[in-house]
Every structure is written in C-alpha cells, then in structure tokens.
Amino acid sequence: MNRFDDSFLQRYRRRHPHLFPDTPGRERPARGNGYVSEAAFQADAAEHLTLLGWEVQEGPKGSLGGGPVWYTAGWPDLTVYRTDGTRRLWFAELKQPGNRPSDTQLACHGRLRAAGFRVTVAFTLADLLAAEAQERP
C-alpha cells in the first residue's frame, strides 16, 4: 500500500486546509450558540437561572494571569439549587457547539448521577432552560 494513497491525502487535506486554498470544499456548518466564549455563555446562563428563582454557584472561568485554578477536576460549570426548602439541586455543564465533555468531566458527571443528581450538558441556552423547566417545582 502506498503511503500517499487517496485516503491518506484526503485526511491530510482535511487536517491542513490552509495548504490547499484552491481546493473546492463544502461549507462547514455554523458552529455557534450566539456566544463568543463558554465564559459568556456561563454568565448569561447564570443570570437567566437566577431570574427564574434559582441560586447559582458558578465554577471557575479561568484564572487571572494564566495561573492555576484549584477546583475538583471535571466538576460541572454550574451548581443550581433552591433555598426555599424544596431541596432541589442539579448541575449544568456548558459547552460550545462542537465541543464535548472531557473523559474526566464524564466520570465526574457519572458519579454525581449515581448519587441521584441530575447533570445536564447544555450546548445552547434553550437546552439549559429545557432542563430547568423539568427541575422547576
């Protein structure tokens, strides 16, 4: 088998499209949920949930100056709960479309689910608000 067979060249072109500017290709679908970053998505999500009567504990959005952030690996971005005595608590992992939770995050989510908690992975605000509607007392 030739190292530069058609399948190798196809994969190479996909990985390095800048090397083949004249090659016609199909348009990529839009990857977005209206937010420029996951941090912007998280801030808006927390605000919406707060307006709906939930308390929201946000996970770290990064550190100042690129230093370390000490936090349990894989813990969801938002811890969402009620303080009205209804004992409602659930978690939300926010992702930009096209991204997926890491293996560490999936393992943490699995442990939380095994303990009886809801963990929602939301790619859009609509995904998050649909989960919120199911959790609403």
Image: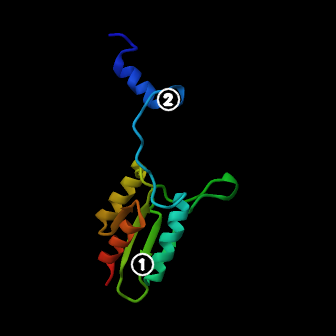
Q: In this view, does 34 lie above or below 57?
A: above
Any mark on residue 81, and which? 1
Residue that lies at the very extreme toward the right in this rendered image: 65
Q: Is residue 125 above or below residue 62?
A: below
- Marks 2 and 1 sit apart, C-alpha to C-alpha, by 45 Å
Neighbours of disc 2 within 10 Å: few (<14), some (14-19), many (20+): few
In the image: residue 98, left or right of residue 116: right
How many numbered discs? Answer: 2
Closer-to-camera residue (130/92): 130
Q: In this view, does 75 lie above or below 58?
A: above
The quarter of the displayed image where residue 123 is located:
bottom left
Whether residue 59 is visible: no
User: Tag 1's secondary structure?
Assistant: strand
Any mark on residue 43, and which? none
Q: Where is residue 16 in the image (x, y as percent from the top left)?
A: 50, 29
Amino acid found under the numbered disc labelled 1: Tyr
Instruction: State which quarter of the image contains the N terminus.
Output: top left
At 38% from the left edge and 89% from the top edge, which residue is drawn? 85
User: Tag 2's secondary structure?
Assistant: loop
Closer-to-camera residue (117/133): 133
Q: Is residue 17 above or below residue 81?
A: above
Neighbours of disc 1 within 10 Å: few (<14), some (14-19), many (20+): many
Q: Where is residue 120 in the image (x, y as percent from the top left)?
A: 35, 64
Whether residue 104 is visible: yes
Q: Position of residue 99 (x, y in %)?
A: 43, 50
Amino acid found under the numbered disc labelled 2: His
- Front of the two marks 2 and 1: 2
Identify the residue position indicated by label 2 in the image: 16
